[in-house]
Image: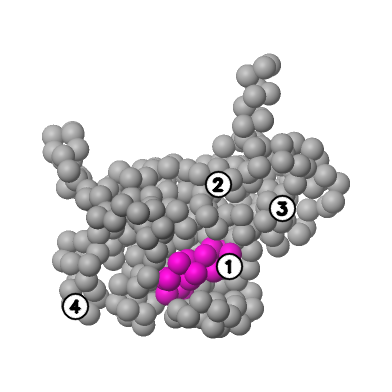
Amino acid sequence: MTTNPAMDGGNFVHNNTIPPKESRVLPLFSLKGRTAIVSGAGAGIGFAVAQALAEAGANVAIWYNSNKKAIERAKEIEQTYGVKCNAYRVNVRDAKHVESAINEIVKEFNGRLDIFIANAGIPWTQGPMLDGEIEHYHNVVNTDLDSTFYCARSAGLHWRRQAKEGTDIHGNKIDFKYGSFVATASMSGHIVNIPQLQAAYNAAKAGIIHLCKSLAIEWVGFARCNTVSPGYMATEISDFVPKETKDIWRDKIPMGREGEASELKGAYLYLSSDASSYTTGADITVDGGYCRWGCKVETEK
């Protein structure tokens, strides 16, 4: 069994990490000169996150599956923020395709990888588990959970090498401290949604949260790993949901509405930047208060 180089005899090595030298807050959010990859970025949350990272100065590669609008949106990001931004069609359900895509992007951009946002995901749409198809279960789990593992593995290999060797993929010296992996989980990884039934989706999102908590420990010497758990968001992923169901959602959201993708930008930027240098294994819930209200109800019972 391979040991964790950040541990010695079951305890963590002291001064295992180095804090940033910058103490002013705004410079800590700068991503100038860094390379970021965002999966599931053709629209919705992923596209909003790609915009945020680009605005902070990062060069961004956006991944899409079938939404070819991502190609135009990449050009839009490039022109608006003055950074490099290209779109790539990537099958995140294929580990080898994920690895080759990351390697290609690292070579094509500036030879390094700094940030990976694992955002690709699909909803469960077949109601009760007993009435759903096994194939649909595999589609949801493979797209939501397995792809996160594949992306983390391939990104982590780059970060471990960059930290150990202090060089980019071409062998040039770089100033690299830590990578940042941020996965899109969901409040569904914390609670059971109603009235819709979606056990497979809930389980996949809970798995993402615990996967990232585990990787935070495994990677402590060269990368941070965190998750963001959005609540109900006004994006394309919920277009199939009838208005009557969305009205029930709003009844249970303290803020009384769905969130906008732009309202997630700050959480992802924080976790991607040096502003979160002492944050790893964390989950930020952005749900308009839904989970807190649910906890209160359960406590009162």
Task: Check contact, mark 3 vs mark 2: CB within 8 A.
Answer: no
Visible residue check, residue 135: no
Residue tagged 3: 125
Category of crowding for the residue at label 3, using alpha-carbon neighbours closer than 10 angstroms: few (below 14), some (14–19), many (at least 20): some
Task: Check contact, mark 2 vs mark 1: CB within 8 A.
Answer: no
| Type of the residue with mark 2 | Ser
Vertical side of 288 occupied by 84: above or below: below
Mark 2 and mark 1: Cα distance apart in space: 16 Å
Q: In this view, does 92 lie to the left or right of 103?
A: right
| Type of the residue with mark 1 | Phe
> Furthest residue to the right?
244
Mark 4 and mark 2: Cα distance apart in space: 37 Å
Q: Which of 190 and 35 is in front in this view?
A: 35
Task: Check contact, mark 1 vs mark 3: CB within 8 A.
Answer: no
Q: Where does the image place residue 130, in percent across and percent down from the top left?
A: 70, 41
Q: Where does the image place residue 23, in percent across and percent down from the top left?
A: 31, 52
Residue interval drawn in magenta: 46-61
> Furthest residue to the top?
301
Q: Is mark 4 on a helix, strand or loop?
A: loop
Q: Which residue is drawn at 17% across and 43% down?
A: 15
Q: Residue 229, which numbered label?
A: 2
Mark positioned earlier in the residue sequence (1 or 3) = 1
Mark positioned earlier in the residue sequence (4 or 2) = 4
- Magenta segment includes 287: no
Mark positioned earlier in the residue sequence (3 or 2) = 3
Mark 4 and mark 3: Cα distance apart in space: 48 Å
